[in-house]
Image (cartoon, helix red, strand yellow):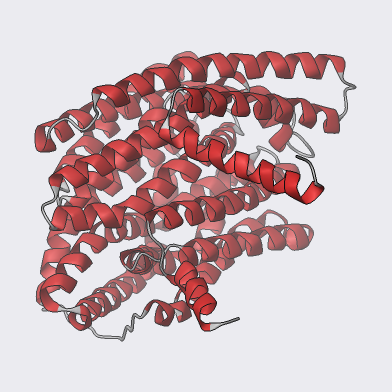
Amino acid sequence: MDGGLKKKFKNLIFRQNVTQAAILITILATISRVIGFLREMMIAAFFGAKKFTDSFIVAQAIPGVLAGLISGALSSVFIPLYAEWREKKGKEEAERFTSILLTDILIILVGATIFSYLLAPLIVEILAPGFNQETRSLTLSFTYIMLPSIIFWGTYGLITGLYNSQKSFFIPNLAGVLGSGVFIVSIFLFHGTFGAYILPWGYLVNVFIQYILLIPALKGIGVSLRWEFNLKYEGLKKALILIGPIFLGQSVGILNMAVDRIFGSYLPEGSISALNYASRIYQLPLNLFANALATAIYTDLAFSAQDDNLEKFKLSIEKSIRALLFFIIPATFGLIFLSTPIVKLAFQRGAFDALATQRTSESLTFYSIGLVFMSVNLIMVRGFYALHDTRTPTMNSILALLSNIVLNTIFIKLLAHKGLALATSLAAFISSILLYRSFRLKVGEVISRETKRDIMRFMISGFLIGMLAFFIYRFLNGVLPSKQIYFAFSLFSAIGIVVILYLYLGNKWKIEEAKKIWALINKGLKFTAGILGIR
């Protein structure tokens, strides 16, 4: 490998531009989602939707509450602060600021973890008041095993934020893929030996693996960190001021999840698991498109805001929302129309029975209603953070939480588990309206008339191809033999046909995203034809 090729390869691994980053994140996120789905399929097959999975989901939320709060707040506030510190004080001082922040947070998290062992019984009581004594005891045992993950997850956001600030997105996503792979292998090999206890132990090992893989590669992006405990450092005060509102906002988001668990604990056994399995499916497009795009553009948004380049900032937001909705809107209709066959193919085997499929597919339908709003919210929140405005998203999160509690109270009586999923979607809708209104007041209109026209096209065509996919699936499934392989063929064929049709329509309408994908397809076909000698 010559020097030029080595340099290109190194840049691809350690530093990427926005396009490369979005592609790499999407590819690795796809692999990660596939591996994550294999994990969920394995859990469903071995443990079904029963008390074991209900206990694991609630117990997993407990270390996730504290770690998620700190990690999410750090990852959101770190990139704009790092950009400011590096521009004003230089690279060396920016790295010192990072070292101090990491050391201080790590020490705090160790103390928080120890304290959490004392509070765990009370937290389980609060999060799952409807559990019987046996399920509650199992939940507490799982919690004790997973609590050390607070230390690793809590600082994970800061380290990934450091990678992202250097426009290096490959390593953090690769670490996630490898960690999930270890989790799957541990479930497959040891579920017979450890029983349901392999779930919390596998989770802990997964977290540890991801964290350890990130540390050595820091040198590859030219970053050098050291241990330095300093509570009086000037940058720490500014970080804490900005983290405070984000911490509150993140806590509201996690409290939303906790509220759903609390309400779900009063429903029949397996309801929490059904909601969780459904969330794994609808989060696929959310992670593949929305999270990948939001992560890729965040650094550019932060630097545009730092340079006071408002027009570039607004254009980036608009293009991101349009690109996102081009994929998310048809995915939404696809999940709504095909919820039952998707869940059946993904999970119905072993301990996961027809009742679990019914509950999960019903939950998926109602969750999918809010998918568009959840996706757009991710982009807008990143925009506010890039502008150093943490108050607006926080206030919005509080209103969304209150909405979710009220809506849960109303719909759980009428629709049970379906009501909790619908409440989440409606709360996301309310949040989108409030965020967009605040965004317009802050920077002006960001969605042009042309983009609004394109979004209407996405809506109409997404609905039509969703219906078409449903009828193609029903037709194929009706005429083919009733075997799993033919069932899968029917579903994937229906999805494949409408995806090609949707891209074709987008290309005819001269939608930028569709034209790019269609051009790649044409290149691939020409390349294949050349290899086969076809003109």
Task: Depth check: give the residue in front, 191 or 168.
Answer: 168
Compare residues 505 and 332 and report the one nearer the observer: 505
Closest to the observer, 113 or 221: 221
Quarter of the figure with the C terminus:
top right
Q: Could you say which is closer to the camera, residue 509 or residue 432?
A: 509
Residue positioned most to the right: 481
**Vertical placement of residue 334 versus 282, above or below:** above
Point 33% across, 84% down: residue:
224
Residue 167 appears at what percent x and percent y? 36, 64
Q: In the picture, which quadrant includes the N terminus?
A: bottom right
Q: Residue at x 29, y 34 (%)?
A: 401
Residue at left 56%, top 26%?
504
| Left or right: 442 as drawn, with respect to 356 | left
Q: Is residue 135 above or below residue 173?
A: above
Q: Can I make out residue 377 in this image?
A: no
Query: Is residue 194 left or right of 222 when viewed as pictured?
Result: right
Q: Is residue 79 above or below residue 9?
A: above
**Outermost residue toward the front?**
535
Residue 154 in percent (x, y) is at 37, 64
Identify the image quadrant of residue 189. Answer: bottom right
Q: Is 501 on the left or on the right of 414, as rendered?
A: right
**Percent position of residue 232, x then y:** 11, 78
